[in-house]
Amino acid sequence: MAAALRKFPFSLQILLGLVLGVALGFLARANDIAWLTSTLDTVGHLFVQLLKLAVPPLVFTAIVVSVVSLRGVANAARLALKTLLWFGITALIAVGIGIGLGLVTDPGKGVTLDLAGATAPKKSGSWTDFLTGIVPTNPVGAFVEGNVLQIVFLALVVGAAAMLVGEAAEPFVALNRSLLAIVQKALWWVIRLAPIGTLGLIGNAVASYGWDLLAPLAKFTTAVYVGCAIVLFVVYPLLLVAAGRLNPLRFFAGAWPAIELAFVSRSSVGTMPVTQRSVERLGVPREYASFAVPFGATTKMDGCAAIYPALAAIFVAQVFGVHLGVTDYLLIAFVSVVGSAATAGLTGAIVMLTLTLSTLGLPLAGAGLLLAIDPILDMIRTATNVAGQALVPTIVAAREGTLDRSAYDSAGSRDLVDADGTDRPTERLAPAPA
């Protein structure tokens, strides 16, 4: 059966897992089959845990190697600045759409919820916590606790130091390249399990979150999905055409495996190897992609840090009867553009939401009202995040004249994961020696 399954394109395998998961989820919910719901939950949870297991070493080694590799890239500083600039531009557009949808749909008006039972999430964020949390007190603790933001900080500092040290740092850089290749290889084994993980994650979501739970928040849920869809299928294509003179259909053909995996895994960092490979297939130079994608996977969050907190802040304000003025909306935009690194590429956006709520002076307990449906929302949010993480390096490379247009035009013509095993993803992903 496994041999027969490998004959199907990887994207089709994930789609089959999605369809089967939905069917099993409906079956479990309709017939109250507890063991099936538990099994689906276990399968999905194990898949996500395997992805998370690789996050600390993957993020550290990928960023160290990518920063060092920039010394072999012409105009590296300009590329980095342009990448950050496009991160900010797309985040600003996304949060504008989120605010606009919130004003049009009024997602919190008429919603009847038990506010007495609303409690603030255990994990919350503030500007003080965010700024002080960037620098670890113990570098080992950052890895043990899986604090991605602190790992990114350490990796950037170490990578920059290694680049300036030069030849003396080559043994260390070589060790990181080897570790990166090993982690990526192991992670690709996990990614090959994505169809099974999809079955468990989607199946458990359908079995656990029925219409009874979604009904009071249906307008809000719809607004989040519509907002993400507008960014994904309207804003991004327009930017590809206007800024990069690129065919949007070819972009989605190349990036779709990463977007699809992000939707089911709900982890930008866990999807990072697929995103990087997709970006390279789109014709972005490997040396630049190896910097832009890992950096984007930890800081570029149009779904989690722009659309969602904007809509959620408006929802919470309306539910609690708090009026928001022009200054409040400007604050939402500021937090979304500047504070997006707080989400750090892991599943969920609670830290970013509480950071936004605390900045606006809204009740943090409002975030607790949305926790029940967070996994449902996180699927489309993460898919939007990853699409943006692939979009920016593609546009920057196109504008810099370094994009391989022939590779871009043929993106998607070859399966991401070859059935015969001849394609070696680790070799494709590992940056060339600087």
Image (cartoon, rainbow, N blue to C red):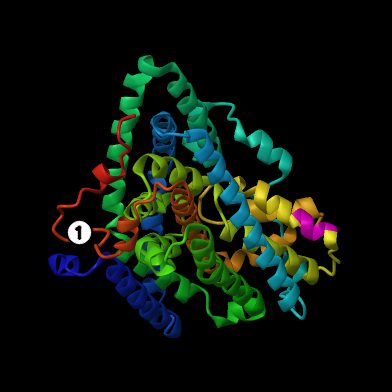
The reply, left or right, for residue 7 in relation to residue 274 is left
The picture quadrant where one finds residue 258 is bottom left
Residue 128 image offset from top left, x and y in percent: 73, 38
Comparing 269 with 37, the one in front is: 269
The picture quadrant where one finds residue 319 is bottom right
The residue at the point 43 percent across, 60 percent down is 262
Comparing 54 with 59, the one in front is: 59
Magenta region includes residue 169: no
Residue 37 image offset from top left, x and y in percent: 41, 72
| Kind of residue sitting beneath label 1 | Asp
The residue at the point 53 percent across, 79 percent down is 210
Question: Pointer 1: what residue?
Answer: 418
The residue at the point 63 percent across, 74 percent down is 223
Quarter of the image that includes the N terminus: bottom left
Comparing 283 with 139, the one in front is: 283
- Circle 1 crowding by C-alpha within 10 Å: few under 14, some 14–19, many from 20: some
Q: Residue furthest top?
A: 168
The residue at the point 51 percent across, 51 percent down is 346
Residue 31 image offset from top left, x and y in percent: 42, 84
Comparing 252 with 189, the one in front is: 252
**First to last magenta residue range:** 327-331
Is residue 143 placed above or below 395 in the rendered structure? above
The reply, left or right, for residue 315 in relation to residue 392 is right
Report if residue 124 is visible in the image: no
Q: Helix or strand or loop: what does disc 1 sit on?
A: loop
